[in-house]
Image (cartoon, rainbow, N blue to C red):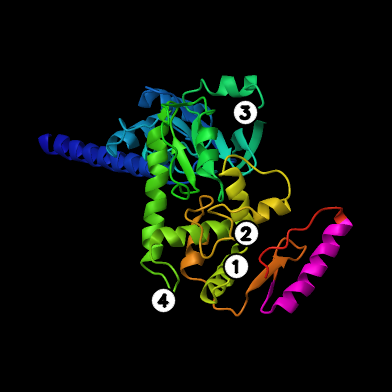
Amino acid sequence: MWRSIASNALTLFIVVLILAFGLIAWGRQAFTGPGPLTQAICFKVDKGASLSQVSRGLEAEGAVSDARIFRIGADYSQVGNSLKFGSYLIQPQSSMGDVLAALTAGGQSTCGREVNFRISVATAEVVLRELDPATNRYVEVVKFDPAKDAAPTAYLDAAQASDIRWRITLAEGVTSWQVVDSLKRADFLAGNIDKLPAEGTLSPDSYEVEKGFDRPTLIADMEARQAKTLAELWATRAEGLPYATPKEALVMASIVEKETGIPTERKQVASVFINRLAKGMKLQTDPTVIYGVTKGEGVLGRGLRQSELKRETPWNTYVINGLPPTPIANPGRLSIEAALNPDTTPFLYFVADGSGGHAFAETLAQHNENVVKWRAIEAAKGEEAAVGVQE
């Protein structure tokens, strides 16, 4: 009898053990296998939300098949207390493990709404946009210039949300004055900038910030990034360049930046100026003259006058020899690289060619022919031509 009871108990234990292993295997498969989502969604984790609340929300939105298995997996992975508030993009068929990783990895939210304050040469605009999960592309909600427009209601409402992301983007070629003047109007920043950063020392880049971020700290970050870029590229510079210091290379890079917006042209443009310096020729580039007129405080908004081309300023390269004393804008990495590793060319001149690029020339005669073509193009448009570098 006891032998029968023991046999039955052993059989029952084995059955229970098999069921337990089967349940574990099923749970593991449910946690690591493809999830039920058929299209991407943005899932919001509220500040202070518990694992239980998040798991139920994921199940309600169809991101996970079973909230209990998600919680068990999170606890087993020891990240159940590591949820990061924000909005996160959950891709179709993401496993529970993938979802858990997205919600606990840290860093910025991966979807939802974003405010991007874009500072360019001509404008400074606040852009509120929202990620469309289906296309994984941002859709513009509203855009305004804080210097001219009142903040729209959509922006004011969004600015109160806890999961909104904030970004500052500097375009290549902006001046330090333009950056500081624009940052003063960013109502989501704090702190006063008491000193204008030296021209050329701010890195055109994208900066993730938080609401209430300190302006001087942001400027320091911009300066640190530019210094790092300049030091890195200076260390790999070509031989025989006409720069005694990294600052002189930065001056050249700023001129290249203002002369062309085409990445593939930058090294050619740099070669023209380096060739002119090597021959003792004046640089004769209009952007430096413009900087002498404006000091970087805004856009000139008109063509240069003959009197301005002849006026002696430290930046008028039609008058002075060599490089001007300071950069004329904040150049991006590609322009700094072009100044430090230019193409080897025989060119001494260039002028716009009507396609957005430039026609380069080795001789003044060739250049004059290119200028005639450019003036004809501009005459057809009813505009006054700028002729680039010339004799």
Identity of the amino acid at label 4? Answer: Glu
Between the residue at mark 2 and the residue at mark 1, the CA separation in whole angstroms equals 8 Å
Which circle marks residue 259 in the picture?
2
Q: Counting residues from the N terminus, which is met first, the one under dot 4 or under dot 2?
A: 4
Q: Nearer the viewer, mark 2 or mark 3?
A: 2
Which circle marks residue 239 in the picture?
4
Identity of the amino acid at label 3? Answer: Ala
From the viewer's perspective, tell me whether residue 135 is left or right of residue 114: right
Q: Main secondary structure of the magenta part?
A: helix
Judged from the image, the secondary structure of the residue bearing numbered disc 2 is helix
Find disc 3 in the rendering and name its residue: 147
Asked whether residue 237 is in view, the answer is yes
From the viewer's perspective, tell me whether residue 385 is left or right of residue 159: right
Farthest residue in the left direction? Answer: 2
Find disc 1 in the rendering and name its residue: 269
Which residues, given as a range, are shown in magenta?
A: 360-380
Identity of the amino acid at label 2? Answer: Glu
Which circle marks residue 91 in the picture?
none
